Image (spheres, helix red, strand yellow):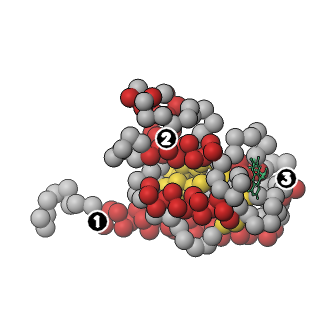
């Protein structure tokens, strides 16, 4: 089975992040199809176009990690009914310089998780709004708003021990792998024939 390289962007910076736990567990649920690597965002200075004339090493590293991936998976908490500032900053960094966005045309998935009841719905859709301008084809269904997520959902090895959460997360992981494959195939079919045949 083909494995897709996925850059995972986790929206929380805290060490004990539930979303980071979920991201790690999630990638293990479809490891035959998804080769996940977290693209870290905690060391990215705030985006400033002046600095971009000589970009910091961390910006270049982040942009290259996104560019090298077949798809991008966002796993994030909601802050104040929108996305955390650190995640928005990472999106701004990856989207520039103008015309050279690392995110353009990458298939994306959006997962939000919260101890609260509505599972980061506001953030999920704020992120989807950004993806429109980023020109990222985002998987529409299934959606993933995981509410009531606490440390108790994970075992000591990080695996999801809650059957309901594991089942939904597994379904999402396989659907996301299908989505990335679909977009890759479509892009390959539309790419110009390098031999020039049919021109
Ligand atoms: C600044 C801030 C704003 C928050 N706003 C929301 C919110 O709008 N909705 C929500 O469900 N939880 C909110 N929370 C609670 C987070 O969902 C909770 O802290 C969660 O554990 C953060 O994700 P993490 O465990 O991955 O760090 C907020 C937390 C912080 C620190």
The answer to whether residue 3 is visible is no
Around disc 1, counting alpha carbons within 10 Å, would you say few (fewer than 14), some (14 to 19), or many (20 or more)?
few
Mark 2 or 1, closer to the camera: 2
Confirm or deny contact between disc 2 and disc 1 (CB under 8 A).
Answer: no
Residue 154 on image: x %, y %:
82, 55
Q: Position of residue 48 (x, y in %)?
A: 48, 34
| Tag 2 secondary structure | helix
Are circles 3 and 1 on residues that touch, CB within 8 Å?
no
How many numbered callouts? Answer: 3
Q: Residues within 10 Å of mark 2 (few under 14, many from 20)?
A: many
Q: Residue at x 71, y 52 (%)?
A: 79
- Pick the residue in front: 11 or 141: 11
* Residue 84 left/right relative to 114: left
Q: Is mark 2 within 8 Å of ligand 1?
A: no
User: Which residue position is annotated with label 3?
Assistant: 151
Q: Quadrant of the C terminus?
A: bottom left
Alpha-carbon span between mark 3 and mark 1: 45 Å
N-term mark: 2 or 1? 2
- Of the numbered discs in the image, which one, if any, rests on residue 190? 1
Furthest residue toward bottom: 141
Mark 1 sits near ligand 1, with its Cβ under 8 Å away = no
x, y percent for residue 83: 64, 53
Q: Nearer the viewer, mark 3 or mark 2?
A: 2
Kindly identify which residue carries mark 2: 93
Q: Nearer the viewer, residue 10 or 196?
A: 10
Based on the displayed image, in which of its 4 quarters is residue 85 positioned?
top right
Residue 198 appearing in the image? yes
* 144 up-or-down from 28: above or below: below
């Amino acid at each position: 089975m083909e494995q897709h390289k996925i850059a995972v962007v986790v929206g929380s910076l805290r060490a004990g992040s539930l979303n980071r736990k979920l991201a790690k567990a999630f990638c293990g649920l479809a490891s035959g199809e998804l080769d996940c690597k977290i693209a870290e965002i905690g060391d990215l200075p705030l985006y400033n176009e002046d600095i971009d004339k000589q970009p910091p090493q961390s910006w270049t590293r982040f942009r290259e990690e996104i560019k090298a991936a077949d798809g991008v998976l966002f796993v994030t908490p909601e802050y104040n009914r929108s996305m955390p500032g650190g995640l928005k900053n990472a999106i701004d960094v990856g989207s520039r310089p103008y015309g050279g966005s690392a995110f353009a045309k990458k298939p994306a998935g959006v997962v939000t998780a919260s101890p609260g009841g509505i599972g980061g719905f506001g953030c999920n859709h704020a992120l989807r709004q950004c993806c429109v301008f980023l020109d990222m084809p985002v998987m529409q269904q299934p959606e993933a708003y995981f509410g009531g997520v606490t440390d108790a959902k994970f075992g000591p090895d990080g695996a999801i021990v809650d059957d309901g959460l594991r089942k939904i997360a597994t379904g999402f992981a396989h659907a996301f792998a299908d989505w990335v494959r679909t977009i890759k195939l479509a892009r390959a079919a539309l790419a110009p024939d390098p031999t020039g045949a049919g021109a």
